[in-house]
Image: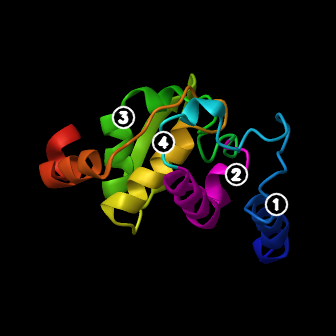
């Protein structure tokens, strides 16, 4: 069985790419693109800080410290056209996401499990993402997350 000899060489590079970077580092992008931008005006600093904590502990492994994702595996959040539909983004975090999607003109077909956080924490991490990685800014409220959760998984399908 040659696959047992080859398997570690296939898996190890993927594991190296998952997490492990300091938040200030970026891979192939601008330095500091993961820092909340000045467009966060009016968003409480505590919300952005909490969002950053959640991103770094839960989202960063797949979407990377710089929000660029892993080409062909995990879509980017940096300058992402997927973020244009806020309700769909909230739905993806609340209920998870599987199947093909197109982000910035590229196809991805994977699974993202539901995020195990309450409405306040999901609003914080999404607000952080909307105000980081070169995204244009904006905020998500706990009430918006609660409304999507209440509407149910089938609401967008």
Q: Earlier in the sequence, mark 3 or mark 4?
A: 4
- Disc marking residue 122: none
**From the viewer's perspective, is 25 left or right of 83?**
right
**21 left or right of 115?**
right
Q: Estimate the spatial distance between the alpha carbons at disc 3 and disc 4, rounded to whole Å.
A: 17 Å
Q: Nearer the viewer, mark 3 or mark 4?
A: 4
Of callouts 1 and 4, the N-terminal one: 1
Residue at 30 percent across and 37 percent down: it is 87
Q: Secondary structure at mark 3?
A: helix
Say which label, 4 or 2, has the lower sequence index.
4
Instruction: Say which mark, if any, is on residue 43.
Output: 4
Residue 19 at x, y percent in the picture: 74, 63
Residue occupied by mark 3:
86
User: Mark 2 and mark 1 in contact (Cβ < 8 Å)?
Assistant: yes
Q: Which residue is mark 1?
A: 21
**12 and 47: which is toward the camera:** 47
Estimate the spatial distance between the alpha carbons at disc 4 and disc 2, rounded to whole Å. 24 Å
Highlighted magenta segment, given as a residue range: 45-67
Viewer-closest of 74 and 52: 52
The outermost residue toward the top is: 105
Q: Which badge, 1 or 2, is on the more N-terminal residue?
A: 1
Is there a contact, CB below 8 Å, between mark 4 and mark 2? Answer: no
Q: Residues within 10 Å of mark 3 (few under 14, many from 20)?
A: some
Q: Is residue 78 above or below residue 66?
A: above
State the residue in front, 106 or 131.
Answer: 131
Earlier sequence position, callout 3 versus callout 1: 1
């Amino acid at each position: 069985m040659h696959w047992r000899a080859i398997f570690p060489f296939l898996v190890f590079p993927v594991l190296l790419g998952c997490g492990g970077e300091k938040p200030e580092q970026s891979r192939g992008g601008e330095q500091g693109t993961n820092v909340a931008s000045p467009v966060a005006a009016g968003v409480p600093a505590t919300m952005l800080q909490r969002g950053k904590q959640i991103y770094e502990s839960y989202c960063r492994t797949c979407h990377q410290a710089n929000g660029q994702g892993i080409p062909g595996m995990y879509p980017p959040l940096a300058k992402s056209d997927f973020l244009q539909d806020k309700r769909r983004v909230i739905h993806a975090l609340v209920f998870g996401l599987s199947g093909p999607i197109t982000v910035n003109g590229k196809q991805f077909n994977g699974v993202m499990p539901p995020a195990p956080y309450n409405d306040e924490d999901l609003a914080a991490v999404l607000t952080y993402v909307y105000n980081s990685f070169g995204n244009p800014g904006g905020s998500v409220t706990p009430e918006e997350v609660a409304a999507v959760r209440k509407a149910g998984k089938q609401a967008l399908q």
